[in-house]
Image (cartoon, coloured by chain):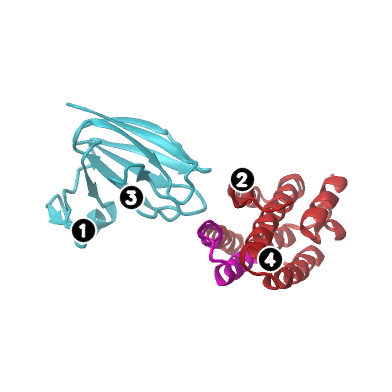
Chain colours: A red, B cyan
Amino acid sequence: MLSRLLMAVALTASPLAGCAHANGDGMSDPEIAHTAYTAGDLDIRYAHLALALSDDAAVREFAKLMIQDHAAVNDAAIALITKLNVTSEDNSLSRALVEGAAQKRAELAAQQGRAFDCAYARNELGYHQAVNMTVEESFIPGVSSPELKDLLQSALVTFKVHEGHAAQMVEELKCPS
Amino acid sequence: MPFVKQEDRRRTLRGLMGIGAAYLGSGLAFQVAADSGVRRAIIRHFAFAPDVLKVKTGESIEWLNADLVPHTVTAVDGSWDTGQLRPGQSEAIRYMTPGIAEYICAFHPHMRGRVEVSAD
């Protein structure tokens, strides 16, 4: 699994593999909840950047969908941790995600037009691939709360749909390799 | 394609007690239906269940969004649409004419289904 996470790093410059918690070992439920929430929130921020910088209809539609869907999943996460009377916990992995995403946003913002569209689309695909792998292979097996596990499993279905949509977007944009 | 009248169960719950009323904003007339003659379907994990529904003219289908994200149930030919269904929200469509209609989720178009409306 570590080699697959490293491949995800090569695709997205994701900090997931560089973090001691990248394989989910030792993470508590509050830490897993916070990290999953953060991952969704960061994709919302990527989407807002796309709406600010892209004129491509497909890219803008995808970005709006990311905002809508990730906001809904995060609302469900907040409702659940409120119900469970849990306080989500910041941790080294969530901090690494935030730092990595800030770097990626700066890279994206330096581009424009088709170059931005292709960079955004590729990042969305790689980001969802990396997050989905972490959720499926680390967070879901590692979480102890049945309700949080159920939420993560439902969220993973959503994120995999997004991954497929991002792959389609990359293909349809016909970005140079 | 079936001609449909859309009913809004939220308006039902606000007390339109079996009285026909004009649907403000669209000009479409609709009737509040009783619970009998209503088929129900669930939207969960980006799929409609069941995805193929068979009803008779005058009967309704109510879709409940049991997913984490918003969905719609939208006729491919544009003749009817539940509008956005937030998680936990439901909406019903009544079918008045025999025919077959393919439908999708407008937000996630890979989600597909079919309504088959038969005469009484």
Q: Is residue B96 left or right of residue A100?
A: left
Mark 3, residue position: B82
Q: Name which quarter of the figure residue A66 lies in.
A: bottom right
Residue A98, given in percent of the width and then of the height, sits at 74, 69
Specify the segment rendered in magenta: A41-67
Callout 2: SS:
helix
Image height of B82 relative to B37, above or below? below
Label 3 lies in what chain?
B
> In the rendered structure, which amino acid carries the disc numbered 2?
Gly
> In the rendered structure, which amino acid carries the disc numbered 1?
Ser
Mark 1 on the same chain as mark 4: no
> In the rendered structure, which amino acid carries the disc numbered 4?
Ser
Q: Inspect this view and state whether residue A20 appears.
A: no
Callout 4: SS:
loop
Mark 4, residue position: A88
> In the rendered structure, which amino acid carries the disc numbered 3?
Thr
The structure residue drawn at horizontal position 23% and vertical position 54%, both measured from the top left corner, is: B12
By secondary structure, the bulk of the magenta-drawn segment is best described as helix
Residue B110, given in percent of the width and then of the height, sits at 50, 41
